[in-house]
Every structure is written in structure tokens, then in C-alpha cells.
Image: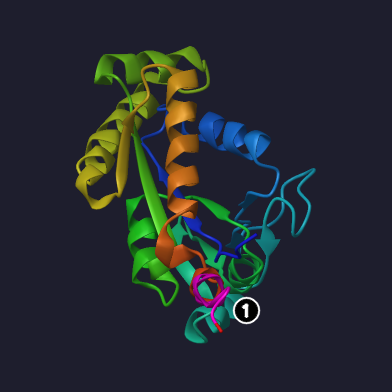
């Protein structure tokens, strides 16, 4: 079997478009697909386990990682820092395993601009319509009208960055969208430039039977 370098798979979408569900389905489909565990400076919530839900760290420790180039992307949200540590992702790539990132368009830009950016496959998930997106948000029964209005406004801003992604899928049917994502990953894994041992395999192949 020809070895390959692992991928960094970026999934982005407005809230309510189905990204989290699709991410879970992809990991159920391929047990070797790992989810990038973010680092954060916020305090652990009840039941959260360090290294499983987040890598919890101090603000000084987080900023030191940024300064040393150990974060693929990072941002500050409501006074807390969040980011994707580079080390675990790099180890997975060298072992031929893919890493899934649930980040917004800004995080995606930072990852693509990083030293590992050549290994990125980015997918943006669109809702079938904005009224449907709002219906899904309301169906959660978790947010007030004001919060939903804010999410809808943010969604328009996020959708405006759709053209920055390698693939754009309209999630009008969850099963079909999952099948398309599987097809994308299968094809990207088979790209010639991602198969690290292909050159050596071909050289050996060409030398067979040559005196």
C-alpha cells in the first residue's frame, strides 16, 4: 500500500447548516479521522476533560505557543483565547491520518496560510435557504428572538466567504451531503501529490524485468 500524507479538512458553515452533524457522521464513517482538539484559556466547565474536550491552558501559555508558531489558527472570543495546536496535527499528518477542523472562515484562512497549508482541503456547507436556516435555529428551542436575529446576521457575513473554499455543498439532504463529503475525501486522498510513496513505487515498477 502506498503511503500518503494526512490531510487537514476544514469544515465551515453558518450555525444551523448541519456542520456538526456532518462532522460526526464523517468520523463514524472513518474511525481514523481525528477531530482537532482546540486549546483555550477559559476555565473548564463541569464534565469537560483536559485533552479530550479542550486543551486548557493559561493566557501566558497560549500566547507563548502563538509566538513560537505552535498554533495553526487562533482568535479571541468574549475575552477567552481559542486556537488549534500544530503539534498533534503534524504528528497525525506524518502518520497518514487526517484531521477535521470545525472553524469559521477566519480560522480557515489562518490554517491555509500556515506552514502546513498545502495539505488543506476546505469545505463550506450552505443551507438550502435562509428561511430554512432560521427554522432550524428556532427548532433548537435554545435561543431568544434577539439571539436568533444576531445569528442570522452573522450567517450572512459567513456565507459571503463561500468562494474562498475548495468545495461548497448545499445541505438540502443530510444523507446526500454526507455522501458528497465522503467522495471529496476519497478523491483528495488519492491525489498524486498526496501519495508520498508513489514516486518510489513507480520507479520500482519501471525497473521490474530490466536487465
Q: Viewed as shown, does residue 112 lie left or right of 203?
A: left
Q: Viewed as shown, does residue 188 lie left or right of 43?
A: left
The structure residue drawn at horizontal position 45% and vertical position 72%, both measured from the top left corner, is 116
- The residue tagged 1 is 61
Q: Viewed as shown, does residue 71 lie left or right of 104?
A: right
Residue 47 x, y percent position in the rendering: 80, 43
Quadrant that contains the N terminus: bottom right
User: Splitting the image into 4 quarters, where does residue 157 fall?
Assistant: top left
Residue 11 x, y percent position in the rendering: 44, 45
Magenta stretch mostly in which secondary structure?
helix
Front one among 152 and 88:
88
Q: Is residue 206 magenta?
A: yes
Quadrant that contains the C terminus: bottom right
**72 over 103 or under it: above or below:** below
The part of the chain drawn in magenta is: 202-210
* Residue density around tag 1, few if under 14, some if 14–19, many if 20 or more, within 10 Å: few
Q: Is residue 209 magenta?
A: yes
The structure residue drawn at horizontal position 60% and vertical position 31%, both measured from the top left corner, is 25
How many numbered badges does the structure rendering display?
A: 1
Residue 50 seen in this snapshot: yes
Residue 188 x, y percent position in the rendering: 43, 51
Front one among 200 and 28:
200
Amino acid at each position: 500500500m502506498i503511503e500518503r500524507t494526512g490531510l487537514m479538512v476544514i469544515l465551515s458553515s453558518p450555525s444551523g447548516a448541519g456542520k456538526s452533524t456532518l462532522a460526526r457522521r464523517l468520523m463514524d464513517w472513518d474511525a481514523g479521522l481525528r477531530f482537532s482538539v482546540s486549546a483555550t484559556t477559559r476555565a473548564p466547565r463541569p464534565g469537560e476533560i483536559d485533552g479530550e474536550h479542550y486543551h486548557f491552558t493559561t493566557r501566558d501559555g497560549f500566547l507563548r505557543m502563538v509566538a513560537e508558531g505552535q498554533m495553526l489558527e487562533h482568535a479571541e472570543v468574549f475575552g477567552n483565547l481559542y486556537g488549534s495546536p500544530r503539534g498533534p496535527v503534524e504528528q497525525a499528518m506524518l502518520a497518514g491520518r487526517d484531521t477535521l477542523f470545525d472553524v469559521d472562515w477566519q480560522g480557515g484562512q489562518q490554517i491555509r496560510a500556515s506552514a502546513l497549508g498545502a495539505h488543506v482541503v476546505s469545505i463550506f456547507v450552505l443551507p438550502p435557504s435562509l428561511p430554512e436556516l432560521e427554522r432550524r435555529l428556532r427548532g433548537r428551542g435554545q435561543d431568544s428572538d434577539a439571539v436568533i436575529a444576531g445569528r442570522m446576521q452573522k450567517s450572512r457575513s459567513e456565507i459571503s466567504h463561500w468562494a474562498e473554499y475548495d468545495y461548497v455543498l448545499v445541505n438540502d439532504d443530510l444523507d446526500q451531503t454526507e455522501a458528497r463529503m465522503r467522495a471529496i475525501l476519497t478523491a483528495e486522498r488519492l491525489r498524486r501529490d498526496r501519495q508520498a510513496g508513489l514516486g518510489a513505487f513507480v520507479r520500482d515498477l519501471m525497473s521490474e524485468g530490466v536487465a
